Amino acid sequence: MASQEHPVSSLSALSLSSSPCSTYSDPHLSETISFDTKEMRNLLDMHNIEDRDGLYNLIIESSVFNPRKVGSRVFVSPDYNQPMEQQREVTMERLQYLVDHGVLGGWITERGAAIELRRMALNEVVQIYDHSLAVMLGAHYFLWGGAIQFFGTKRHHDKWLKITEEYGIKGCFAMTELGHGSNVRGIETITTYDSNTEEFIINTPCESAQKYWIGGAAKHATHTVVFSQLKINGKDEGVHAFIVQIRDEDDKICPNIRIADCGHKIGLNGVDNGRIWFDNVRIPRENLLNSVADVSPDGQYLSAIKDPVQRFAAFLAPLTSGRVNIAVSSIYVAKVGLATAIRYSLSRRAFSLAPNEPEVLLLDYPSHQRRLLPLLAKTYAMSFAGNYLKSIYVKRTPETNKIIHVVSSALKATLTWHNMRTLQECREACGGQGLKTENRVGHLKGEYDVQLTFEGDNNVLMQQVSKALFGEYMATQKQNRPFKGLWLEHMNSSSPIIPDQLTGSILRSSQIQTDIFYLRERDLLHRFVAEVSAYQKQGRNREHAFVLAYQLAEDLGRAFADKAVLLTFIEAEAKVPVGPLKDVLALLRTLYALIVLEEDVSFLRYGYLTVENAAVVRQEVIRLCSELRPHALALVSSFGIPDAFLSPIAFDWIDANSWSSVQH
């Protein structure tokens, strides 16, 4: 067995002399660095490195971000032991601090790919520090500000954008309702129009229509964008967005508006999520965000897009930015977990393999490598996928909106699921130390769990991916054209042939890896189309057929996402010149591909792998973990996350827990 290929004599722990007490040994003194970690960081972060480092330093140097000394080191992170109200207030103080120090300058008033990438880079740094701060920043700038920018026209831009950027008002985003989350088209808030006063009247007709989980609404927001059904002359024109002031200059709730607090949560308690009811609230006609549709002073509904389905799609297209930011930020949080757990495992020892021998480093156990290093490979792979997603988003055109929607949906689900799994494994890999809030890893699970359901429930998003692939398949058949886009061009060729007997060397071929992923996707797409079509022939409509074919839809969505991650990794790897960096990337890419083969049961369920070949894959995963083990420290160092943003157990955990540290 491959696990027997790691003799005791090869374990680095055995070169150290035993001691009556455990001591900390800095892994930098014993681990080797075989590639340029700065170059690797440039690949991972891709853009705005100086801007990121500038914000890292600003946070480290300011008392508002709660610096604390533990042992001989200083760390920065929120004090999650504070009462909820105090967490909320200090979150607002930190947001104001960023505004006052020019960090958020140009976030709304400036346009173009460069400013968008800078905004994303700084948001990723904030996410590493505190999710509550990132959510409050996002609610105001990305959601409220983005709605004004994308749904509004010149009259809204002139009035609202500059004051929003300067934080002169505090905006929030009222879309989700108690009764409707992912199904935005079904929301129940109703808006009518009074042509006599040229005002819209917004009403919450029932309890399930109350706006729910609105970040910033409970205590701080002064304005909101309300999403509501618009009824004109008795006709329902679908969902539209309106600007509504909810608090006055004295922070008093405006007339005919009721606001309640959502209360304490499993995380994000620095965000004042609120509930809002509207009791026939009147707003000026000009407060309709009218880039897609408008209402004339005399009450005529006007829109260049006559089809309500297309109008709704055009209306929601700008909201893709939320999924992009969530997908990418989740990978940066996974990096925090891995950097902490792997550094801890390079200095923490447990058990001797023979009498009178020193205890073994955790990461020198093959089982511990198998727990953490595949997650490290996945995190690298998904970093490149996130970079690709950002690059196509900032270059978006109306023609690419559909592609961005599909890719962002797939990656938002895949990357956030990966983050939660990674944090859980890292928490367990740190043992009891992972339970301490100050060590971050365990606590981050509660902070980021919400990413699995906001901006789209992950399971729903994956079904949307499969529906889009179904639509593309049917379009090629109907129009008698080849597949183009979404990396589906492989469907135009014959099915790839996988060798009957796989070996380790064959499995390390990027072409073989790609072929297996292609084979899985094309077969699942054929199966999904066939199953949906069969249900339709039985008399079900398409939506009902999709619901019944959910299992294949889930398998197909994962196949598409995994393929996208692999192909973006191969593309990033191809740009790196021959050398140590490229060699390590090849190991990471192969481990990513093989761990997907091992973990996803669809490869066995549908016969893409035989039982014998699946066993070969499993053994090769063990070998790859062993080969990556010497690079573990360099790989997490390449994340570029400052030490202060990690936690005490990532460094001298004995000093951090010493009696002198307690007295300090």
Image (cartoon, grey):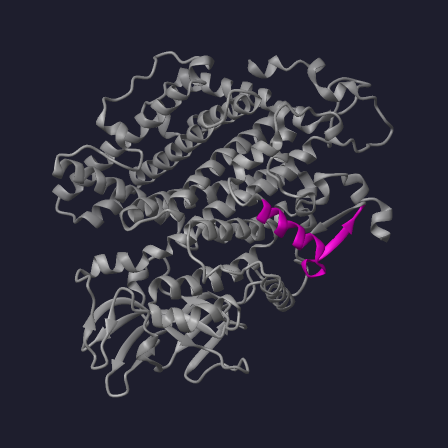
x then y, percent, for residue 25: 78, 31
User: Would residue 376 appear left or right of 213 to someone viewing this image?
Assistant: right
**In which quadrant of the rendered image does the N terminus lie?**
top right
Is residue 523 in the magenta section?
no
User: Would residue 33 appear left or right of 227 to someone viewing this image?
Assistant: right
Is residue 51 in the magenta section?
yes
x then y, percent, for residue 271: 55, 63
Determine which quarter of the picture holds residue 96.
Answer: bottom right
- Judge whether residue 427 can be spotted in this image: yes
The answer to whether 634 is drawn above or below residue 295 in the figure is above
Residue drawn 20% across the image and 40% down it: 532
**From which residue to which does the magenta span run?**
50-71
- Judge whether residue 266 can be spotted in this image: no
Observer-nearest of 626 and 156: 156
Residue drawn 30% across the image and 37% down it: 486
The answer to whether 455 is drawn above or below residue 253 in the figure is above
Observer-nearest of 571 and 417: 571
